[in-house]
């Protein structure tokens, strides 16, 4: 998942306000997750969710809970900020046999979501999987 609208917050209001926004987003993501889900910030304004025992439909439901968690504006640094997100979804083993492959393919789907202006896109074999640089 990659946040939409976060860079302008950091640029206009500084990293302290940006960090406050990230903390609020993380709290909302924790509230949107199930007890068995692992939610992690993987860098900058990117987050990942590892959800066990999901079908394509339940993955969509889980993903949409995360999308909906950001519909309300975020109040930080005496301002209100509109933050959205784009999410890519990859399932194991269908979309990658290893967590690394699945994360790379979810990243490709996330870039497709951003390009299409969508909140959630599932990986498809025609998407170019970008190499993740750690």
Image (cartoon, helix red, strand yellow):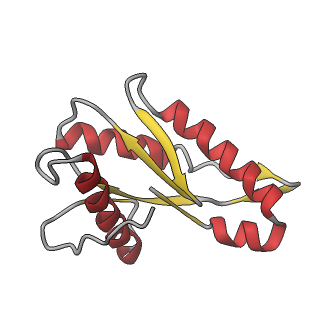
Q: Nearer the viewer, residue 132 or 53?
A: 132
Quick one: quadrant of the N terminus? bottom left
Q: Position of residue 8 (x, y in %)?
A: 70, 72
Tell me: 72 left or right of 37: right
Position of residue 57 relative to residue 15, above or below, is above
| Place of residue 58 in the rendered image (x, y in percent of width and height, measured from the top left) | 25, 36
Q: Is residue 23 left or right of residue 36?
A: right
Task: Identify which residue is drawn at 46% across, 44% down.
Answer: 66
The residue positioned farthest toward the right in the image shown? 78
76 vs 115: above or below: above
In the figure, residue 63 lies in which quadrant?
A: top left
On screen, residue 7 versus residue 51, left or right, reads: right
Compared to residue 1, the image places residue 9 above or below, namely: below
Give the quarter of the figure containing the C terminus. Answer: bottom left
Q: Residue at x 73, y 66 (%)?
A: 9
Residue 45: quadrant of the picture? bottom right
Q: Count the numbered circles shown.
A: 0
Residue for point 76% across, 73% down: 11
As drawn, which residue projects farthest toward the front? Answer: 134
Q: Is residue 61 visible?
A: yes
């Amino acid at each position: 998942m990659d946040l939409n609208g976060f860079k302008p917050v950091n640029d206009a209001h500084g990293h302290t306000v940006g960090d406050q926004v990230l903390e609020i987003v993380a709290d909302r993501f924790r509230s949107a997750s199930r007890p068995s889900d692992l939610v992690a910030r993987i860098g900058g304004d990117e987050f990942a969710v590892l959800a066990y025992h999901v079908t394509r439909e339940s993955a969509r439901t889980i993903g949409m809970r995360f999308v909906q968690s950001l519909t309300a504006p975020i109040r930080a640094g005496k301002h209100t900020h509109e933050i959205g997100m784009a999410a890519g979804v990859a399932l194991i083993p269908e979309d990658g046999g290893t967590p690394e492959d699945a994360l790379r393919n979810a990243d490709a789907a996330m870039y497709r979501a951003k390009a299409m202006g969508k909140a959630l896109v599932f990986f498809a074999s025609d998407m170019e999987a970008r190499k993740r640089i750690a």
